Amino acid sequence: MRFASLGSGSKGNATLIEWRDTCIMVDCGFSIRDTTQRLAKLGKTPEDLSAILVTHEHSDHWKGVVPLANKFSIKVFLTAGCLKSRNLENPTTDFQIISSHQQFDVGDIRVTPVPVPHDAREPVQYLFNSESHQLGVLTDIGSLTPHVEAQYAHCDGLLVEANHDLDMLAAGPYPAFLKDRVGGQWGHLNNQQTARLISRVAQDQLQHLVIGHISEKNNSVDRVKLAVEEVFKAEGNVFYACQQEGFDWLYLE
């Protein structure tokens, strides 16, 4: 199994997971043109996509989902709450409603939705299983719950957000209400929360750790590294996804 990112941040998100003949895109926060160009850098085209899985309805994850799915006849998997939040009239998209507590298969990949605390309508994150590996994608979550920690404890690959640094958020340009939202229980993980999660997972099993959704205004890679490298003691690789490039293919072996 391998995974890559088209871009990670508040201006747009999309992640690819591939195993055998199945290629899944998680979220699509880019225009069709931008998505197609970003896919090409990874050696893929929209026609290669088996499905799009949506985590939640915020525009940096949703913007390109319907246009891309409609143009290339791609199935879209999402929760009922997420779909209802968009108030789509006479949708022509092939929406597949999922339960946030029930596994399902997309081609060769077993998918496990994980409910998360975030200020959206029925948001989920996902775990992906091949025959021998598990990949976790965990962004846009405001606080760590026992269920989330248990679900992500044994991953071979993990993409997790470290959205903001507490001091930079407090001193940053956001208005007070937005600071409260981002830093609240239903917002995004700060560097210390991310480090706490990393300290509790089975690090010896983790081949690749990727830190994503790093705020360009309220965080820095240097600050994330200080927090992460203090707790990640295993021999696995650590990568830092960016808005423009995401990250290249990483392989679980």
Image (spheres, rainbow, N blue to C red):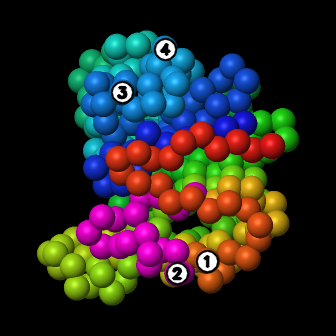
Residue beneath disc 1? 229
Do the residues bearing badges 1 and 2 touch, measured as CB atoms within 8 Å? yes
**Residue 115, position in %: x, y?**
55, 55
User: Disc 3 to disc 1, how far (Cα)?
Assistant: 33 Å
Left or right of 234: which side holds 217? left
Q: With respect to residue 213, does 226 lie above or below?
A: below
User: Disc 4 to disc 2, how far (Cα)?
Assistant: 40 Å
- Which numbered marker is on residue 37? 3
Among numbered discs 4 and 2, the one appearing first in the sequence: 4
Magenta stretch: give its range. 210-227
Left or right of 219: which side holds 98? right
User: Disc 1 to disc 2, how far (Cα)?
Assistant: 6 Å
Q: Residue furthest right?
A: 132
**Residue 22, position in %: x, y?**
65, 23
Residue beneath the point at 45% across and 30% down:
41
Residue beneath disc 2? 226
User: Disc 4 to disc 3, how far (Cα)?
Assistant: 13 Å
Left or right of 245: which side holds 33? left
Residue type highlighted by circle 1? Glu
Quadrant assignment, res 81: top left
Q: Residues within 10 Å of mark 4 (few under 14, many from 20)?
A: few
Residue beneath disc 4? 47
Residue type highlighted by circle 2? Leu
Asked which secondary structure carries label 4, the reply is helix
